[in-house]
Image (cartoon, rainbow, N blue to C red):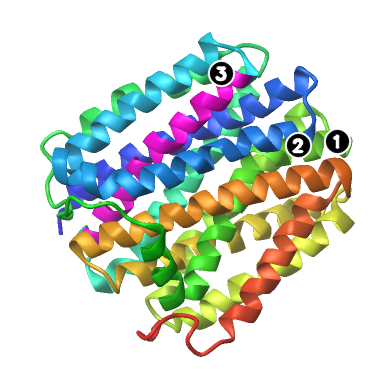
């Protein structure tokens, strides 16, 4: 196994997580200070989802043309330019377009990075190494809100930190090999439908985690402010959720190499359901802090296990295409989640974000009980 390449690709993807973690909450807080409501902020949070769908469609074709390493470098630099323009052009309509472009560009990075990592790892280490990827990515997102809390949201420094990360990280990919081969063809929505029929519970979990991540980085800070917490406390609560996601992924990955992945998956879904229901009840108690950890860990565990199950089923172009379907589902989740939770929070109930996650987790629990939910290959 190429350990140097594994850690180089891991570091490049982590730079994206940190850049998004410091810039996405800053966008939401800036819009809040401008007087925009939860729905308008939800629309902004959903814009990258449209870009995700486009990026997923063209990723395989572009990877075949440029090669995976070169395309990843180009997309990282383009992401740096897009985030820089957020700081230079403070306008809601302009930001909508820029968030769309960020969705396209960084989706391609995630598809290629996850495919590259899953191609490199050996089967007996797959759970732990994919979990290390998930845990490290979550930590990079944790560092974003914490860093933003330290430097403050009153100026554009958070945007420029993101730019610096994405400008320098492509250097790590120079001279790296072992990337999956890709065919020059587009990934269609009909192929996505086939993927969902073959692996329905994995498809649902990916879309739900995408909605979770988009809402946590954009709507959760606003939710906490509306519940009476200070801006700094709101950012620390977001960070605590990501801590849970990060710290427990390695134990979950280790368990995935030793026990039934289906049983572990079901346990994560139950935990997400119960924690989502408990948060509004315990929000103003000390118990909310460990509850935020469980909330993040259970959601992140679902995504990590989904990647593990995909990695054991596909190779090369099939693996790239499967991860393109992951990105398409990510786009669906990012689009529906913030819009539904933002509208619900503004016009139905202030806790709509948590009710949305509880409903999604309940659907996942019910779906996971089906015998064919994980596809033909047993998740062992």
**Splitting the image into 4 quarters, where does residue 361 fall?**
bottom right
Element class at badge 2: helix
Q: Can you tell which mark lies on residue 218?
A: none
In primary-sequence order, the first of circles 3 and 1 is: 3
Q: Nearer the viewer, residue 41 or 73?
A: 41
Examine the rendered structure and indicate whether residue 32 appears above or below residue 236: above
Q: Nearer the viewer, residue 241 or 205?
A: 205
Which residue has dot 1 on it? 226
Which residue has dot 2 on it? 39
Q: Quadrant of the N terminus?
A: bottom left
Disc 1/disc 2 C-alpha distance (Å): 14 Å
Examine the rendered structure and indicate whether residue 254 appears above or below residue 184: below
| Residue 54 x %, y % | 40, 43
Q: Residues within 10 Å of mark 2 (few under 14, many from 20)?
A: many
Q: Magenta residues, as a range?
A: 93-119
Q: Quadrant of the C terminus?
A: bottom left
At 35% from the left and 68% from the top, the residue drawn is: 310
Which residue has dot 3 on it? 94
């Amino acid at each position: 196994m190429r350990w140097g390449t594994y850690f180089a690709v891991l570091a490049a993807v982590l730079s994206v997580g940190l850049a998004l973690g410091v810039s996405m909450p800053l966008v939401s807080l800036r819009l809040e200070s401008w007087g925009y409501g939860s729905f308008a902020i939800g629309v902004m949070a959903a814009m990258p989802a449209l870009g995700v769908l486009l990026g997923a469609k063209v990723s395989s074709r572009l990877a075949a043309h440029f090669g995976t390493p070169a395309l990843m470098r180009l997309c990282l630099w383009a992401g740096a330019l897009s985030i820089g323009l957020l700081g230079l052009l403070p306008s809601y309509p302009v930001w909508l377009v820029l968030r769309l472009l960020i969705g396209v560009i960084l989706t391609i990075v995630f598809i290629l990075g996850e495919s590259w990592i899953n191609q490199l790892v050996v089967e007996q280490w797959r759970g732990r190494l994919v979990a290390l990827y998930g845990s490290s990515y979550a930590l990079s997102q944790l560092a974003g809100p914490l860093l933003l809390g330290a430097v403050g949201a009153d100026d554009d420094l958070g945007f420029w930190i993101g730019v610096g990360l994405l400008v320098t990280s492509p250097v790590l990919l120079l001279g790296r090999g072992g990337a999956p081969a890709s065919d020059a063809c587009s990934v269609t929505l009909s192929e996505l439908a086939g993927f969902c029929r073959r692996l329905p519970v994995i498809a649902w979990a990916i879309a739900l985690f995408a909605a979770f991540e988009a809402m946590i980085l954009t709507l959760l800070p606003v939710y906490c402010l509306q519940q009476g917490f200070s801006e700094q406390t709101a950012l620390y609560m977001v960070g605590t959720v990501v801590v849970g996601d990060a710290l427990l992924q390695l134990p979950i990955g280790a368990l995935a190499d030793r026990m039934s992945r289906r049983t572990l998956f079901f346990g994560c879904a139950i935990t997400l359901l119960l924690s989502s229901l408990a948060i509004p009840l315990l929000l103003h108690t000390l118990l909310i802090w460990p509850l935020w950890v469980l909330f993040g860990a259970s959601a992140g565990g679902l995504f990590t296990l989904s990647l593990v199950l995909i990695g054991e089923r596909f190779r090369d172009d099939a693996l790239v295409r499967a991860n393109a379907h992951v990105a398409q589902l990510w786009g669906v989740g990012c689009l529906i989640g913030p819009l539904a939770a933002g509208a619900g929070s503004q016009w139905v109930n202030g806790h709509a974000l948590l009710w949305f996650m509880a409903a999604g987790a309940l659907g996942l629990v019910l779906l996971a009980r089906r015998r064919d939910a994980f596809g033909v290959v047993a998740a062992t």
